[in-house]
Image (tube, helix red, strand yellow):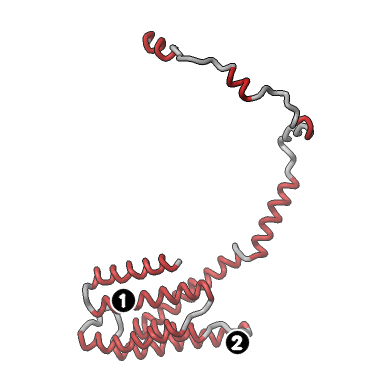
Amino acid sequence: MYPIVELIVALGWMLSVHHYGLTLTALRVAVFGTVLLGVAITDAMHYLIPDGFTLFGLAFALAMSAVGFFLGETQVFATPYNALIGACTGAGMIAIVGWIGEVMTKREAMGLGDVTLMAFVGAALGPSRALITVFVGATLGANGRRFFREHYEWPVIERKYLDLLERLVREPVRSTMEPLPPWIERRRRNLPPARDVVARLPRGASLEPAVAGLRS
């Protein structure tokens, strides 16, 4: 797993430099993708979003927004003002959604890692794209949870296996396998040894291929 992740990160940095050249924008795109990849893999494997990823990404996005503004590289990422508003917007939206979910389900719906993650994304992309990210992520997450619940939860899988076994029991037997001979019959030596069979095979050169070639 680790070499594959390293290869993906290296390819991402190469593509960023290839598309944007040796610029600050290329560095920001590469770091943005690397942080999101680390968050995705860690969350998928351990259901945890480390603060080391999100807080570093947030600080990097805010600092680079100021540097990019002075260098005139603001085509992809947000300006300093939009970065601050975007961080607040992303974190605030996730916090509100998590609070509503916690009130409705009586359990924790969003962790602090989700809040800092969206603060990082909002600081990088700005408020409008942060809102789009929240709504798209919520839609995909809801559809993904529903698809998993309908197809891959254990009661569904158990029901499929039980239906299969029930169908096998109901279906009539279409063919029967010939019964095996008894244990003694299977071990009775009623065939000649292999060396006798080989000894009776014809030996010497065969003229059949040559004769067939002359006839053709």
161, 82: nearer the viewer: 161
**Which residue type does callout 2 highlight?**
Val
Q: Which residue is mark 1?
A: 29
Q: Picture coordinates of residue 25 (x, y %)?
A: 26, 78
156, 10: nearer the viewer: 10
Q: Is residue 178 above or below residue 97?
A: above
Q: Is residue 181 above or below residue 16?
A: above
- Can you say which quadrant of the picture contains the C terminus? top left
Q: Which residue is mark 2?
A: 103
**Which residue type does callout 1 highlight?**
Val
For image coordinates 27% across by 89% down, the residue present is 66
Q: Picture coordinates of residue 109 (x, y %)?
A: 56, 82
Residue 91 left/right relative to 24:
right
Where residue 101 sits, quadrant-wise, is bottom right
73, 210: nearer the viewer: 210
Q: Is residue 83 above or below residue 144?
A: below
Q: Picture coordinates of residue 115 (x, y %)?
A: 47, 85
The local crowd at label 1, few if under 14, some if 14 to 19, many if 20 or more residues have their Cα within 10 Å, is: some
The local crowd at label 2, few if under 14, some if 14 to 19, many if 20 or more residues have their Cα within 10 Å, is: few
SS type, badge 1: helix
